[in-house]
Image (cartoon, helix red, strand yellow):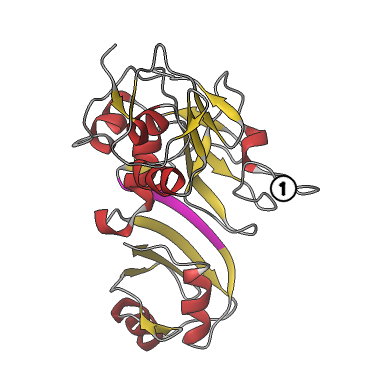
Amino acid sequence: MAPIRLQKFLSMAGVCSRRKAEQHILAGRVLVNGKVADRLGTKVDPESDLVVFDGQRIRPDGHLVYLALNKPGGYVTSCRQAGVPVVTELVEVARRVYPVGRLDKETTGLLLLTNDGRLHHRLSHPSFDHEKEYLVKVARPIADKALARLAAGVVLRGRRTRPAKIERISGRRFRITLQEGRNRQIRRMVRKVGHRVVSLKRVRIASVRLGDLPEGKWRRLSPQELKVLLAGIDDDPARD
């Protein structure tokens, strides 16, 4: 097999995105054949070179997995956390997968998991403008004026949120679509306009919809969903 850049190798193996891999390489956390590889131009042969990241050997994995999970409340979006149930406990696949982005412990709904570091980067980085759609219920009826403020953007920690799409469902329920994902953003935005979120559920990420997937269950992404998500990602290997 022809040599490839080390950051691409780490991404294809499902370790992380290429950009994150570059940071790990520069930090000296990657060894190639027993030597620290801290130059971004380093190339490796996936079939013959020994690559170690943080003490663990990394093997190429051309069989990529893409899952959609309906996350229940009470689970954290992490691969491991002592004493707390994590979302990866809800899926049973042969290969290790990682959550794409985060949902806080109380929030339910659509979460993607994959071992494809390239897709993880594409969906997590704000420059790609992927939409995320949520259903929100607040503690008391919310006025049109407050919804308009949310749509226009509010200032959180000195920086205004990007404009959002808002659709009222009822007096206390509305749909919001964002193109960014700051920490607990919707809950903080709603507090900013004098309300409190009592339930929050994500129903769409880019072209992938939650649909009627039961809470706590998962499914593999369809070929059409993958076609849209992977559009523009180069060197697409075999997928599951």
Residue at (73, 45) in percent of width and height: 85
The residue sitting at 41% across, 42% down in the picture is 38
Task: Look at 52% across and 88% down and name the residue there.
Answer: 194
Q: Secondary structure at mark 1?
A: loop
User: Residue drawn 49% across and 28% down?
Assistant: 219
Position of residue 19 in the picture relative to residue 2 (left or right)? right
Quarter of the rendering occupied by the C terminus: top left
Please tell me whether the stretch drawn in magenta is mainly helix, strand or loop.
strand
Residue 60, percent from left and from top: 43, 20
State the quadrant of the N terminus. Answer: top left
Which residue bears the numbered disc 1? 81
Residue type at tag 1: Gln
Residue 177 sits in quarter: bottom left
Residue 101 lies, with reference to residue 106, above or below; the image says above
Residue 130 appears at what percent x and percent y?
29, 53
- Taking the image as drawn, is residue 154 in sight? no
**How far from the left and from the top, in percent, is residue 213?**
51, 36
> Height in image: 52 above or below 22?
above
Q: Is residue 117 visible?
A: yes
Q: Is residue 191 above or below residue 207?
A: below
Which residue range is magenta in the image?
200-206
Decide: is 162 above or below 226: below
The picture quadrant where one finds residue 139 is bottom right
Q: Position of residue 142 (x, y in %)?
A: 47, 82
